[in-house]
Amino acid sequence: MSRLRELKKAKNETKNNSMIWLVAGIVVLLGIGSALFLFSGSSNSGNSSELNTAGLSFPLVNVHWHATPIVNVCGENKPIPVAPVTDHLLHTHEDRLIHIEGTVNSPEQITLGRFFGLVGVKFSSTQLLDKTNGDVCENTGQPGKVSMTVNGVPSEEFENHVVRHGETIIVSFD
Ligand SMILES: [Zn+2]
Ligand SMILES: [Zn+2]
């Protein structure tokens, strides 16, 4: 092989090599692109994207958590009904605490809304027990609305709040 041909060959190899890297780069970019697409797609679909799961990773294996729910309507605390246990994963007892017992596979299973639904307390951002936003509180003579705090911090999550161990959750209408 002449020197010139060898040089040409070497040049071609570099060319081929850079082609390989270019193709590999495109493949990687396509991979990242589709992963991002799938990710954004999945976070836009379904209810779970609205749930704040910060600090939690699912499944939560074999937990036994307790949280304290307080329902206050127009300045008066209303006891949580001691409903019979229909779902051992999420229930209450005479202590009227939120009990989360077992393996939790998704945040939907342990939302505040689900708990109140199971024990028969009507609760959303617009309703608490028999009160709907705009209804007048007898004690103040003023229209009230639903609000909530978690460990003393105001929250806008309402029924979508994912309950965590040790929380004190106050839902109020006033
Ligand atoms: Zn318990
Ligand atoms: Zn229990």
Image (tube, helix red, strand yellow):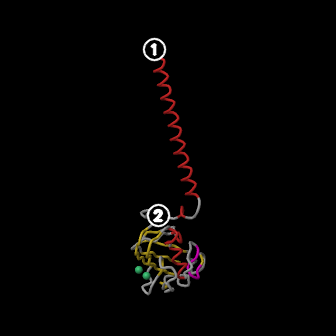
Asked if residue 58 can be seen in this view, the reply is yes
Asked whether 127 falls inside the magenta stretch, the response is yes
Ligand 1 sits in which quadrant?
Answer: bottom left
Tell me where residue 11 appears, x and y as whole percent: 47, 21
Disc 2 to disc 1, C-alpha distance? 67 Å
The 10 Å Cα crowd at callout 1, few under 14, some 14 to 19, many 20 or more, is few
Whether label 1 lies within 8 Å of ligand 1 gets the answer: no
Q: Earlier in the sequence, mark 2 or mark 1?
A: 1
Residue type marked 1: Met
Tell me where residue 1 appears, x and y as whole percent: 45, 14
Stretch of the chain drawn in magenta: 126-131
Residue located beneath label 2 in the image: 53
Depth check, mark 2 against mark 1: the one in front is 1
Q: Which mark is residue 1?
A: 1
Q: Closest to the observer: 54 or 6? A: 6
The residue located at (41%, 63%) in the rendering is 55
Left or right? Give the position of 55 relative to 31. left
The residue located at (47%, 64%) in the rendering is 53
